[in-house]
Amino acid sequence: MRYLTIQPRLLVFAAALIALATLTSGCQKLKARDNLNRGVQSFKATKYADAVEYFKKAVEFDPDFPTARLYLATAYMSQYIPGADSPENKQYAASAMDQFNKVLASQHIEAIAPQAGDPFDPTQHEALMQQPSNLPPNHVTQLLQKGYRLHDRTLRPAQVAVSKPE
């Protein structure tokens, strides 16, 4: 008899915990969207450092929010000055690349980057030139530009140089 009175209490307690977890996650998403909107306003006002902070907060509140990561990467790139050789500038570029790569990974997009010596695969590689090489014919000698694939589908083939048959 005592078992029957404890079980309903346990069910009510479990339901309350589930409801609390659901409400908390929804609140986090709202905070992420709010910070994203504030970041966009700062970005439009060319206050890139402020925008970066808002976008970072948005990513902290909702790590699976790709739009916040895209804006964060774009804000980093807006602070990057091509050709400037300062540690801060290099950090902006590295941070932007890191965020862009995380967005690609979250969308299941992966790079195709064959190494020298890999066999040429026409489904994933595009040969732009042939080079004399010690490698067997039709092997990659140089990666010219990365390609990308979504699951098993090639979005853009990697551009490569291949060994020339003798």
Image (cartoon, rainbow, N blue to C red):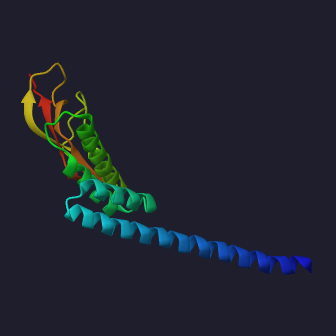
Q: Residue at x 23, y 58 (%)?
A: 47
Residue 1 % position (x, y): 92, 81
Q: Is residue 135 above or below residue 68?
A: above
Residue 92, by quadrant, is top left
Q: Return the residue nearer the eye: 112 or 22.
A: 22
Quarter occupied by the C terminus:
top left
Q: Is residue 80 above or below residue 31?
A: above
Q: Residue at x 37, y 56 (%)?
A: 56
Q: Residue at x 22, y 34 (%)?
A: 86
Residue 94 % position (x, y): 28, 41
Q: Is residue 87 above or below residue 6?
A: above
Residue 56 visible in the snapshot: yes
Residue 109 visible in the snapshot: no
- Marks counted in the figure total 0
Asked whether, in this view, residue 58 is left or right of residue 159, the answer is right
Residue 133, by quadrant, is top left
Residue at the right extreme of this rendering? 1
Asked whether, in this view, residue 68 is left or right of residue 135, the answer is right
Asked whether, in this view, residue 110 is left or right of residue 24, the answer is left
Q: Return the residue nearer the eye: 27 or 112.
A: 27
Residue 144 % position (x, y): 14, 36
Residue 142 % position (x, y): 17, 30
Q: Is residue 23 above or below residue 152?
A: below
Q: Return the residue nearer the eye: 122 or 40.
A: 40
Q: Return the residue nearer the eye: 44 or 142.
A: 44
Residue 159, by quadrant, is top left
